[in-house]
Amino acid sequence: MSSNNQVSISSIITELIGHLGQLPGIGPKTAERLAFHIIKAPESKIIELSKSLEKSKQMLTFCKICFIVTENDPCSICTNEYRDKSVLCIVHDSIDAYAIENTNSYTGTYHILNGSISPINGIGPQELTISNLIERINKSTPKEIIIATNPTIEGDATSTYIINQITNNEIKISRLAIGIPIGGDLDYTDNKTLTQAFNSRQSIR
Ligand SMILES: [Zn+2]
């Protein structure tokens, strides 16, 4: 028995709970529940899950054009002839593009920043894919850029920085605003709200 009166049933279970508890949004109680669910589940299911985890690390890469997580580089969005290459939507992470794709209402392309500017966490513009973005904009000159960064302090700072870097005044720039709660995350926004946010995006210049 340990000093805090807790009995460790098995170090293997403790280890599993520990790993699960490191996942985002998983608190200690949920980690415990998941661990015991895994232990009780059929072995074949768990082998499938672990193979899937392994595959997602080994076989996925980043698109060299838009930096989205993909199996094929360039990705299926960048190489799709039906996607509108004149519209570029800028998001923090692949999960945001995934959320937008799920609305089935956006037909343009993406640029994934791989995070947001956050001086407190030591993340500056050079840690993100902003220089690649500016190079891409200067080369392909899109007609419209939709900034879909989160409505947070970091998202605002990132948005402002990017807008200041775009020197071509011919390019229309807009930002998603309406519907997404202030301080909220794009990937937590439901499909309907996200579609509405797209349709009523606010023009910046
Ligand atoms: Zn791509």
Image: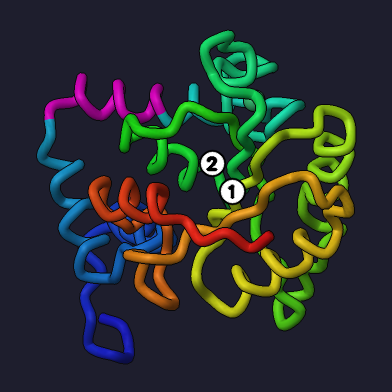
Q: Tell me: residue 26, above or below residue 147.
A: below
Q: Position of residue 153 (x, y in %)?
A: 59, 79
**Type of residue at label 2?**
Ser
Between 205 and 7, the residue placed more toward the observer is: 205
| Residue 71 quadrant | top right
Q: Which sits in the foreground, 121 or 182?
A: 182
SS state under label 2: helix
* Residue 121, above or below 4: above
The span picked out in magenta is 42-52
Seen in the picture, residue 38 relative to 183 is either above or below; the reply is above
Q: Which residue: 79% across, 45% down?
A: 170
Up-down relation of residue 146 to residue 152 (above or below): above
Q: Quadrant of residue 73?
A: top right
Q: Main secondary structure of the magenta part?
A: helix
Name which residue lies at 52% across and 12% down. 82
Image quarter for ligand 1: top right
Query: Pointer 1: residues within 10 angstroms few (<14), some, or many (20+)?
Result: many
Residue position marked by numbered label 1 in the rendering: 146
